[in-house]
Amino acid sequence: MTSPLIVKNILPLLILLGIFLPGSVPGHQEVSSQDIGISEKTGDYIPLDLTFRDENGALMNLRDIIRKPTILTLVYLSCDHICPQALGGLAAAMGNVKLTPGIEYQLITISFDERDDPEIAREKKVNYVKATGMHFPQDAWKFLTGDRESIRSITDAIGFHFQHDAHGFIHPVVLIFLSAEGKITGYDYLSKYQFGNVIKSKIIDIWNQAEYIKLRQEITRGIFKLPICQKCSQV
């Protein structure tokens, strides 16, 4: 299973389930500048010699972890806005993916906040694994924390630019797809495909919007009009 095929299998589910991200909230902004945003490095390899701690406190070398297609997310674990919405949506999608987690693909979440530690990583992992609604193998979703040097190395390699501010961090919201060899095969920006704002509207009201109903019906019939869907269908 290649990472492009994982994109094709998972992204339509994320759209159907609805990751309703606020357009802009404190500490999270979809911005593009030299200092904040994404500088795509598709085709490059991440440095596999980097070491992080997993949610149990064990030192883990990326070379020993990334041995299968991987969906990588970068968050900070004290976040209470977009990060949990994005991870919650990703978790919800996993129960509908017709691939075997831990064998055909895996998830890795790395905190870019050096203050995060294995204890908070373990707490968050329990919640998100439970949110998959299935028997999701523990080894198939790792939550990693690290020191400033390791964090800077992985974010630089991916082209992930963020800044600290009074509310937390300003950063992009993105899924990064990696091959089993650590090659960056693609990026997808979840907050570019919004159909509502959960801070301002009820989820049921967003779900029942005519535009969103039409999109769900088209996707279930195999009609993919969004750019992100067309990208998958060309794989």
Image (cartoon, grey):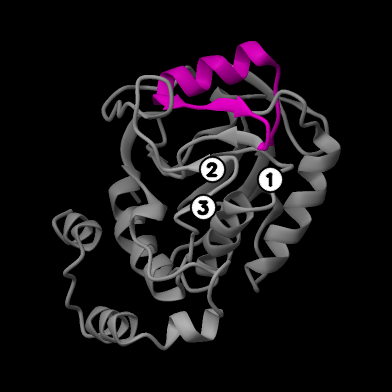
Q: Earlier in the sequence, mark 3 or mark 1?
A: 1
Helix, strand or loop status at disc 1: loop
Disc 2/disc 3 C-alpha distance (Å): 33 Å
Task: Kindly identify which residue carries mark 3.
Answer: 103
Query: Where is residue 229, by image quadrant?
Result: bottom left
Up/down of 133 relative to 187, above or below: below
Q: Is 91 in front, or is 104?
A: 91
Q: Residue 79: which numbered mark, if any?
A: 1
User: In the rendered image, is residue 235 in sight?
Assistant: yes
Query: Which element type, helix, strand or loop, lies under badge 3?
Result: loop
Amino acid carrying label 3: it is Ile
User: Going 69% across and 51% down the picture, which residue do you hit?
Assistant: 80
Residue at 65% across, 73% down: 133
Residue at mark 3 to residue at mark 1: CA–CA distance: 30 Å
Left or right of 89? Residue 59 is right
Give the number of the mark in front: 2 or 3. 2
Asked if marks 2 and 1 touch (Cβ < 8 Å), the reply is: yes
Residue type (three-letter) at the residue carrying disc 1 = Cys
Query: Magenta includes 155?
Result: yes
Circle 2 SS class: strand
Point out which mark residue 90 bears: none
- For disc 2, the marked residue is 28
Label tally: 3
Residue 148 in magenta? yes
Q: Please identify, in this view, whether the residue under mark 3 or under mark 1 is nearer the observer.
A: 1
